[in-house]
Amino acid sequence: MTTEIGTAGPGARPRWFDSAGQIEGLLRGVGYLASEHACGVVHLADQLGKPILVEGLAGTGKTELAKSTAVMTGARLIRLQCYEGLDEGKALYEWNYSKQLLRILADNVGMVRRAGSWADLEAGIFTEDFLLPRPLLDAIRSPEPVVLLIDEVDRLDIEAEALLLEVLSDYQVSIPELGTVSGRQIPMVFLTSNSSRDLSEALRRRCLYLHLDYPSVEREREIVRTRVPGISEHLAEQITAIVGSLRQLDIRQRPSVAQTLEWARTLLSLGAETMDAELVADSLRVLLSYQSDIELASARLAAGQLPCAT
């Protein structure tokens, strides 16, 4: 049995973009400065209707790329945050048990069952009226354009990957009580990974691959100027030079681009016009999240080994 959702069927989504250059301009318009290569992969994924697997260190802009794509297209963003132990009840669907129970009670008056077999009752409660779609099913069933973000897919166990493979292969979901539920569309899909474990070859084959690294100092300075209105070129240059130096240290957690922006906004709110060693030392906790990292950065700062002290 196959339950068709809508009339268009998967694959009916029109292409969103004409070129990689158009994507670069649209992303810039929403404050995301993407590389030419990244825009090329997004354009190819749009043309082929394939998911994008975005790998890289934490804080390199993987999640933000998906979010910015949703903003620039006006599409609905649906996010599945992955974690160990994620099951189909959280990823695909589950049944509204409370509503089903009420239906069963309504079919029983005075504890005496109405005429009809149990099969009749079962058929009446396992219908779409009682189905609660979760992110994966919601994304393919949505009548409006969707960007589906499957975040930190490397945190899933092998069994949970199988759930993704079914959806990403045919954009349909097998529900034992209903049969195969086909979707209305193929959403634009981004899977992000911090490379904490190897993903299966089957999942990788379904996707186009994109690796994101931390931006260069020059590009990050441009990001700061774009995302932090009112900051001077001089202060943005100092901030990104210091962040770039911190990322070269042997620390547990390198500052993300989001933390760079937060630091820039913090310094701007404090009225800072230029950086000195004291200001950096006082605000390191905005950038670094481990005491050992702070101590190492402070030692390098005291030794004059960070840009503001040279």
Image: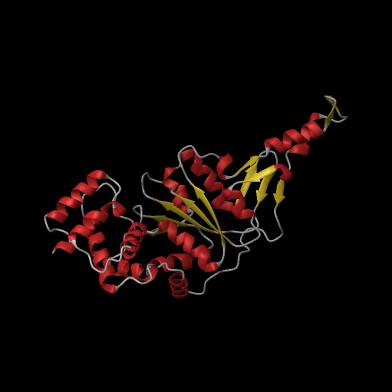
Q: Is residue 106 above or below residue 199?
A: above
Q: Is residue 129 left or right of residue 52?
A: right
Q: On screen, 117 above or below 38?
A: above
- Give the quarter of the figure containing the C terminus: bottom left
Residue 119 picture location, percent across and down = 79, 32
Horizontal relation, residue 198 to residue 128: left or right = left
Q: Is residue 119 visible?
A: no
Residue extending farthest left? 303
Give 125 or 201, whichever is nearer the viewer.
125
Viewer-nearest residue: 188 or 303 = 303
- The colour scheme of the drawn protein is secondary structure
How far across and how far down the image is residue 171, in percent?
59, 53
Task: Specify the quadrant of the image occupied by residue 147.
Answer: bottom right
Which quadrant does the N terminus fall into? top right
Which residue is outermost to the front? Answer: 271
The residue that appears at 30% across and 68% down in the rendered structure is 221
User: In the displayed image of the protein, which residue is found farthest to the right?
Assistant: 115
Relative to 307, residue 154 above or below: above
The percent coordinates of residue 126 (x first, y second) are 73, 39
**Quick check: 130 left or right of 36?**
right
Q: Position of residue 203 (x, y in %)?
A: 47, 49
